[in-house]
Image (spheres, coloured by chain):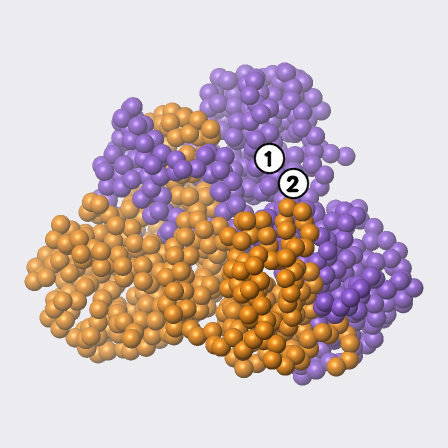
Chain colours: A purple, B orange
Amino acid sequence: MARTATIIGGGVIGGGWAARFLLNGWNVQVFDPDPQAERKINAVLANARLALPALSDVPMPPEGRLTFHDTIGEAVEGSEYVQESVLERIDLKKKVYAQLQQANPGVLIGSSTSGFKASDLQEGSPAPHNIIVAHPFNPVYLLPLSEVSGSPKNQPEVVAKTVQIMKDIGMFPLVLKEEIDAFIGNRFLEAVWREALWMLVDGVATTSEIDDAIRMGFGLRWGQMGLFETYRVAGGEAGMRHFMAQFGPALKWPWTKLMDVPEFNEALVDLVATQSDAQSGAYGIRELERIRDQNLIGFLRALKDRNWGAGKVLRAHDEARAVAFHEATDTGPKSQPLVMSHCQVLPGWIDYNGHMTESRYYFANSESVDAFLRLIGAGMEYVAGGHSYYSAETHIRHLGEAKLGDRLRGELQIISADEKRFRSFVRLMKGDECVATVEQLCLHVDMASGKTSPAAPDVWANLKAIADAHADLPLPEGAGRAVGHKK
Amino acid sequence: MARTATIIGGGVIGGGWAARFLLNGWNVQVFDPDPQAERKINAVLANARLALPALSDVPMPPEGRLTFHDTIGEAVEGSEYVQESVLERIDLKKKVYAQLQQANPGVLIGSSTSGFKASDLQEGSPAPHNIIVAHPFNPVYLLPLSEVSGSPKNQPEVVAKTVQIMKDIGMFPLVLKEEIDAFIGNRFLEAVWREALWMLVDGVATTSEIDDAIRMGFGLRWGQMGLFETYRVAGGEAGMRHFMAQFGPALKWPWTKLMDVPEFNEALVDLVATQSDAQSGAYGIRELERIRDQNLIGFLRALKDRNWGAGKVLRAHDEARAVAFHEATDTGPKSQPLVMSHCQVLPGWIDYNGHMTESRYYFANSESVDAFLRLIGAGMEYVAGGHSYYSAETHIRHLGEAKLGDRLRGELQIISADEKRFRSFVRLMKGDECVATVEQLCLHVDMASGKTSPAAPDVWANLKAIADAHADLPLPEGAGRAVGHKK
């Protein structure tokens, strides 16, 4: 049974929230009086569909249902959670909350506000405890951070419920201990923004040079360790105290012009807009969004490979969903080929033709065989004990084409097996179409001696049971072929 | 003939510079009176050897020679460029420059200073025009940014020479138009550092929470687009002017405490160090460095795949070195198998056993066959014209093991060919050892109809010439095999 979220305000931020909920299987009910809202949300959603699934290594749940509503009351009906992303006007926000709470008195409301504190937002509400800040970062469907900030009126259960909903849609909820204006992220962004505007106004650097100074240097560090851990490393073997001793005195150097604010006028807007056009005008905004998303996918997948930072959040989200998926999946009777893997063709997997690059077919086979090895008890723990199955040879037939976003299923049949080896035959299926077959001989190896050896008795028993069940299956078409032989 | 650089000061920064020069084939002459200098530089170099080559897709040049010297005069002998990375004391720096210029009057000196202007550093020098700022970011061997900042005394030729040396070692030189304290990067870092210390002192957030606020959110954005381009995208279809109109007024909101500096005392150092221990103390500094390097490799390779930001710098550096490499490489007479590819086993290519993951053997074959297709005139332009060779089937024998850092060479032999197809046999060689063979049938396809078709006459002529030359070669051992057949 799908859960339901309400989205009030469908701009870049509201649309990003809508996409994150929908792609995680929630139904989403939108209210936005802008006649363009449906078009705008669908544009964000189109980008998100190309991006968020690329971070997942378990199948995505079926997408939720997206509906648009004419009144706030309708939009909040039957909803478990509201995300409010309207303009930064406190009177407007309070009016929205009043209507939400009138129509659905118990509903939990999270605000995307960049600066208002929860206690400001709660003023005058009959149920202030149900209003809290959940502040995201653009693009909401890719960046995991949600700053969760409540007032003393929010009971711990309300904070905990907000945290859990954020986790359920794959986010990283960071609960603030104290209420402060602008939370943590925007305090930094404001500091940097002021400094950057001064450099422009003083003619020291252009927007393009400033961006390069960030993305060629410390920007790369911050995406994976942040500020303090980076400096801890910079301190070297002597650690954080040494770093502080070296860098502390710099606090007194008058480098910065930070509190002195440049005048915000037409000339400043012109300066920034003109330089920004020169820097990025060759790309449309939608194109820049897709470039940004692809870059972020690359960063996030790199962190996921390494189980670090935002990559840890992705892994935890996968694990939570994998349990649900496996509970819902029946691998079928053993006398049928076993469905051993599911994958989706990711942006990094395609070649210049737009097709899945050929080595990825082998990769998809490896995923299937690895899952089979886990099934018979020869997974990571078995390898840690000094034994493993090594691939000896492999034959691949390319029969069709997989493209970006296609979902592939690996169906594995055992052709033959004994104590020291097995021959597997994997059909890579796109729906009912077989896009490739992979036949493989795997040898059981004692890793210390590097020689083949009999598998452990329980592993062999598991393997033999499946091989026996598969013995009645017909030999697959294409098995036993050599390259270039006639059919 | 290898070029020579001098490194004065062998800490984390000096060691990073030494590694970058050495791995790019320069000889490096070090002066550092610290008796631990040799050990420290070798530790940085060991990390760099695992990291920098992982960014390269062309073979690295032979590593330069590293020598340590007892005097500044000896260290600068025969050197083309000096990188000075001593403590931030202007008197010390000036003393070093005097000795360098006495021993090697014409040498170009770049300073790693974080804050002094070139005109400060040049005071009192007999050759001020040869002293300039080249300010890097840690880890120097991975992050491309070098802020190049001169005074009016540095002639354009000196700036141009510094820029060229930075490019020669794969960096991104950012030339500052105006001399300012702390250049661009450190102005931002100081602003953020002050704000972060206030949050700690005020008890609003811990070091760990602050780092998460950065690396789960805007830190990921900054590594690929920086500040202004990110905001341009956030402005949506209305662009930068719209963003300024929305965000401009926030300049007047009193969120920040930036100019008000927290007192630097023992209590502050304790607070930071204690929280940092709680956050990161489970890892040693060397371990954190390796984690950081692996993360940065992931980010940088993602950007390189997408030819964006720092990834563009890597590609340009590859291209410059590929030309030199191909000029020095002889592919041999055509009656021998053709050496079609070189690759190095990258960190992302290995499995949990530490071996190259099996699908990467197929990938290495694809690199060889793609290079062969370019050789016969069937590269990207040919594909753009609507024709391509598609892989039909592939047989792989795993004969040995490739591990992290191993260099592999793809030697390609044509077994048979006609107008519509060819059979290739690639030996993947690690030195003299054949770690895998890949036999493949490729079909020439008219992409519009999706059917096989004869190759263009010039492509077929090129292919036939090689196939004829290879006809006299013996059929390779293992060609024509099916999976599991006896020898």
Quadrant including the N terminus of chain A: top right
Quadrant including the C terminus of chain A: bottom right
Q: Which mark is residue A213?
A: none
Q: According to the image, label 2 marks what residue?
A: A168
**Label 2: element kind:** helix
Task: Indicate whether B438 appears above or below A206.
Answer: below
Comparing marks 2 and 1, which lies closer to the viewer? 1
Residue A212: x and y, percent?
A: 35, 47
- Rendered residue at 63%/62% (across/down): B419
Report whether B33 appears left or right of B137: left
Q: According to the image, label 1 marks what residue?
A: A46
**Label 1: element kind:** helix
Q: How far apart are marks 2 and 1 (CA)?
A: 22 Å
Q: Quick check: do tags 2 and 1 share a chain?
A: yes
Which amino acid lies under the numbered mark 2 shown in the image of this protein? Asp
- Rendered residue at 60%/16% (across/down): A99
Occupied quadrant, residue B178? top left
Chain identity of mark 1: A
Residue B13: x and y, percent?
A: 32, 63
Which amino acid lies under the numbered mark 1 shown in the image of this protein? Ala
